[in-house]
Every structure is written in C-alpha cells, then in structure tokens.
Image (spheres, rainbow, N blue to C red):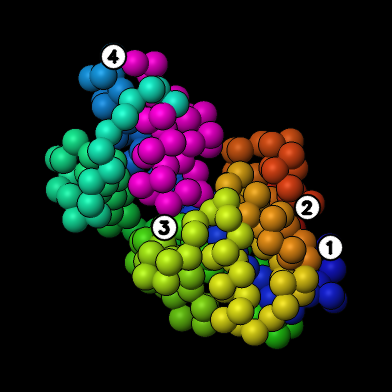
Amino acid sequence: MTWDNFSAALLDLDGVITPTADVHMKAWAHLFTAYLAERGVRPYTDSDYFDHLDGKPRYAGVQTLLASRGIELPFGDPSDAPTAETVCGLGNRKDGVFNEMLAEGIEAYPGSLRLLDFLDANNIAKAVVSSSKNARGVLTAAGIVDRFPVIVDGLVAAESGIPGKPAPDMFHFAADQLGVPYPACVVVEDALSGVRAGAAGGFGLVVGVDRGTGADRLREAGAEVIVAELDELI
C-alpha cells in the first residue's frame, strides 16, 4: 500500500501493537473453561474467543459468550466483586486474571514499532482505539504510551457515552480528536468486531492483521488489506 493519500492511522492495541491479545485470550479461557464446566454446557474453545470476545468491551463480550450457551445472568454493576454471579462480576473476575498475567511484562511487536517509526518520520498522525479499559496500562508497561497523542479506550468510551465496536464511533471520536477527515484515515485491526467498525465508518482503508482470526474472515468483515505484521504496510 501507499500512504500518500492518508494523514492518520487509527490502530487497535491488543494483537495489533502489543501481543496482549494472547494474554486476554488466556484470561478468558481461564475464566470460561471452569465456569462453563460448572454450568454443564458446551465447553469453551479457542473459537469462542474470536467469535464472541475479541475486540468487544469486556461486559459485552461476557453477555455474548453467555448467550451462545443459553445462559442469562443479571447485568449487575461495574463495581461488582469478581465473585458476583453477574455479567459485571464475571467480567471483573477476568480482568483480575488479566492484570495478574500482565504484571509479568509485555513488549510491543517489533514490526509494529517499525510502523510507528515510519508514521512519525512521515508526519502521519496516529491514535490508539481500543475497547480495553486497560489500554493505558498496557501501553505504559510496553514503554510506548507517550507515542500516542490520542488514546480512545474503554474508559474514554464509558465516560463519553461512545458505543463500542463493532459500531464505528470510537474510531470517529479518535479521528475527530486528531482533526483528520475519516477518508484520510487508515484503520488497523485484528478483531472481526474492529474490522466491521472500520468498514462501517467511512474510512479510507481498513487493514486486517491476521493473528489467528483468518484472512478470509477478516476480508469478509470488511478488511481491504490483510497483513501478518504491521511493517508489511511500510
């Protein structure tokens, strides 16, 4: 691809800039393998992560996964204890596991760092657009939080009432913060929900990063370019 017609890159975080998607995947598996076994329903598999959880706000992911097994729980409140039998309680339980795993450290993908260097060298604006409420913590742990003038994460979305992915609103908000028209923005995503958000938003290009979702599925969701590493975009 060429960047000649683009002025900004709107990048997802987990699985795009940092391998935290792997940590999220392990944390979800830790939670739902045991929980679904206790409920006596169809066991949790890796495909559940890509189909129901990847790229979505945490509580929305819990609701979608539970619905796939015919389980209904009260939504509860974000302040619920991790032991609470609510959607928020389960989400908070997963978050606790995730933070324990994250404490072991995280490093950005080398190819992603090379793309960030390229964007900086060519005066192309950039923003992180992540459903995760842990985005700033992840970026800080990776030592790159200062490289992004705009970070639109789950906390910003909740505080500002912005619908999460697959709605395009978080990407629109980030582009507006950068002051860049949507057609001049490239959306870079690895999750189906994020790709769908980019495809629905009127952006100039949607790039799918295949970290296991599958190129065909990313393309069906709306990705126009598929890469395995971000430095393929240089």
- Of badges 4 and 2, the one in the foreground is 4
Question: Which residue corresponds to the image point at 31% horizontal and 29% vertical from the top-left?
Answer: 72
Q: Which mark is residue 40?
A: 4
Residue at the location (75% across, 42% down)? 219
Name the residue tied to disc 3.
Answer: 132
Above or below for 132 versus 218: below
Q: Amino acid at mark 4?
A: Gly
Query: In this orientation, which residue lies closer to the viewer: 128 or 178?
Result: 178
| Cβ–Cβ under 8 Å for marks 1 and 2 | yes
Q: Position of residue 120 (x, y in %)?
A: 65, 81
Asked if residue 205 is positioned above or below residue 88 in the image, the reply reads below
Q: Is residue 60 magenta?
A: yes
177 horizontally vs 70: left or right: right
The image quarter in which residue 9 lies: bottom right
Distance of label 1 from label 4 (alpha carbons): 49 Å
Q: What residue does disc 2 label?
A: 225
Q: CA distance from mark 3 to mark 4?
A: 29 Å
Q: Secondary structure at mark 1?
A: loop
Instruction: Indicate which label's residue lies in the foreground, 1 or 4.
Output: 4
Alpha carbon separation for disc pair 3 and 1: 29 Å
Callout 1 crowding tier (Cα within 10 Å): few <14, some 14–19, many ≥20: few
Examine the image and state in which quarter residue 69 appears.
top left
Amino acid type, callout 3: Ser
C-alpha span from label 3 to label 2: 24 Å
Lower sequence index among marks 1 and 2: 1
Q: Which numbered disc, 3 or 2, marks the residue that appears first in the sequence?
A: 3
Residue stretch in magenta: 41-67
